[in-house]
């Protein structure tokens, strides 16, 4: 009887453990609170886009999710005078679990309080004008999708909430799902349990910032490929070989004089460039034969994607599979988005 009872208890324990493990596997976020849909709060904070339910007061409950990315959008040292509005121009601390991606490196900043003055005015991945965002580098969209993955929940934070709200507005404008993005608000108002202080005062009274603590995403603009200032910039076979040898990334239109299909493609490229800011270089088909590109693109016209000096995709003028891209702007633009 005791043996039977022991076996029964052991079996029950094993089954309970298996059920728990299976439950965790099937529902990896069980035990974490369900996420309410994004809901902008009221008043001045609402104007910044700060969420009503997930903000500086509640974010501790939503940290550590494997289905989420946590981004703080401040600079280590912002040129703006944020002390004038009760903040800190330096990144004085952050919430554990957040990674820092400076918003002023993503896009030019406007609409700051007059007391703050001007912020960073150097290179940016994008330029915004009248609500339209244009890429300044061939790699801009790839970097943006890497830092802000579309298949994750995005929790955005900054100093006071402004940069975070601007970042959500930009992402939504460029096709991100608004229901997956939460503007948490500002670190200056955080009083939770996961604060990581960066600012400290030494024994002799000197204020220092331990930036080594910060999980910081640097953007090396010198390593990126600037988008041409016009829709198409013609290059020679020698220039193409040089760009490939240097490991550059760029888009290339292979043109063919007197070809109506080439004229259609050129029109698509012009429209795409106007809408996105992404432009291309152009090479004539007779020059392609002098380059290694001819190992891939043998029929013209075409568009090729070169990443780090390697041809990764191209339109095949002789293939039925790419016919839509030659005859339909939407198919062409979708092909570009998928392959850039």
Image (cartoon, rainbow, N blue to C red):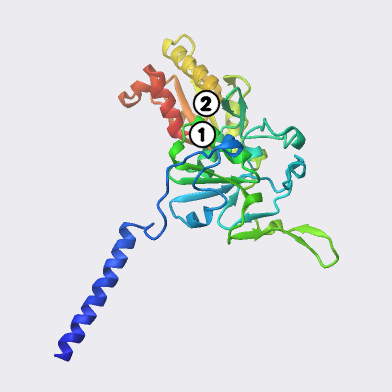
Vertical relation: 172 (above or below) 283 = below
> Do the residues bearing badges 2 and 1 touch, measured as CB atoms within 8 Å?
yes
Q: Residue 29 appears at what percent x and percent y? A: 39, 57
- Residue 222, numbered label: none
Disc 2: which residue:
252
Q: Residues within 10 Å of mark 1 (few under 14, many from 20)?
A: many
Q: Looking at the rendering, which quadrant does residue 298 occupy?
A: top left
Side (left or right) of 318 relative to 179: left
Q: Which type of secondary structure does the marked residue at label 2 adopt? A: strand
Residue placed most toward the observer, 322 or 258? 322
Disc 1: which residue:
306
> Residue at the spot x=44%, y=55% of the render?
66
Seen from this angle, which residue lies furthest front? 43
Look at the image and tell me whether residue 316 can be seen: yes
Residue placed most toward the observer, 4 or 241? 4
Dot placed on the residue nearer the N-terminal end, 2 or 1: 2
> Residue at the spot x=52%, y=35% of the render?
171
Q: Residue 193 appears at what percent x and percent y? A: 58, 62
Seen from this angle, which residue lies furthest right? 204
Q: Residue 213 appears at what percent x and percent y? A: 66, 59
For the image, the number of numbered tags is 2
Vertical relation: 123 (above or below) 37 = above
> Residue at the spot x=70%, y=56% of the render?
211
Look at the image and tell me whether residue 139 can be seen: no
Q: Which type of secondary structure does the marked residue at label 1 adopt? A: strand
């Amino acid at each position: 009887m005791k043996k039977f009872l022991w076996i029964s208890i052991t079996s029950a324990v094993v089954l309970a453990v298996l059920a728990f493990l299976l439950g965790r596997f099937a529902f990896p976020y069980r035990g974490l609170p369900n996420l309410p849909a994004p809901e902008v709060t009221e008043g001045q904070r609402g104007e910044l886009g700060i969420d009503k339910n997930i903000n500086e007061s509640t974010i501790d409950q939503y940290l550590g999710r494997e289905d989420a990315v946590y981004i703080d959008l401040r600079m280590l040292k912002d040129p703006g005078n944020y002390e004038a509005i009760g903040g800190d121009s330096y990144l004085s601390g952050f919430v554990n679990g957040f990674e820092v991606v400076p918003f002023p490196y993503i896009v030019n900043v406007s609409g700051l309080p007059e007391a703050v003055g001007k912020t960073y005015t150097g290179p940016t991945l994008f330029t915004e004008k009248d609500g339209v965002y244009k890429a300044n580098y061939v790699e801009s969209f790839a970097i943006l999708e890497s830092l802000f993955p579309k298949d994750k929940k995005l929790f955005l934070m900054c100093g006071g909430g402004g940069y975070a709200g601007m970042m959500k507005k930009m992402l939504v404008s460029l096709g991100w799902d608004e229901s997956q993005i939460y503007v948490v608000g500002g670190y200056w108002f955080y009083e939770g349990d996961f604060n990581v202080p960066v600012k400290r005062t030494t024994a002799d009274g000197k204020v220092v910032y331990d930036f080594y603590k910060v999980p910081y995403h640097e953007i090396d603009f010198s390593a990126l490929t600037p988008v041409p200032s016009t829709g198409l910039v013609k290059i020679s076979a020698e220039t193409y070989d040089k760009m490939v040898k240097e490991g550059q990334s760029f888009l290339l239109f292979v043109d063919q004089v007197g070809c109506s299909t080439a004229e259609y493609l050129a029109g698509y490229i012009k429209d795409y460039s106007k809408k996105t800011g992404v432009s291309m270089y152009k090479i004539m088909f007779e020059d392609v034969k002098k380059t290694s590109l001819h190992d891939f693109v043998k029929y013209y016209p075409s568009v090729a994607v070169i990443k780090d000096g390697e041809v990764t995709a191209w339109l095949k003028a002789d293939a039925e599979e790419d016919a839509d891209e030659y005859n339909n702007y939407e198919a062409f633009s979708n092909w570009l988005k998928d392959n850039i």
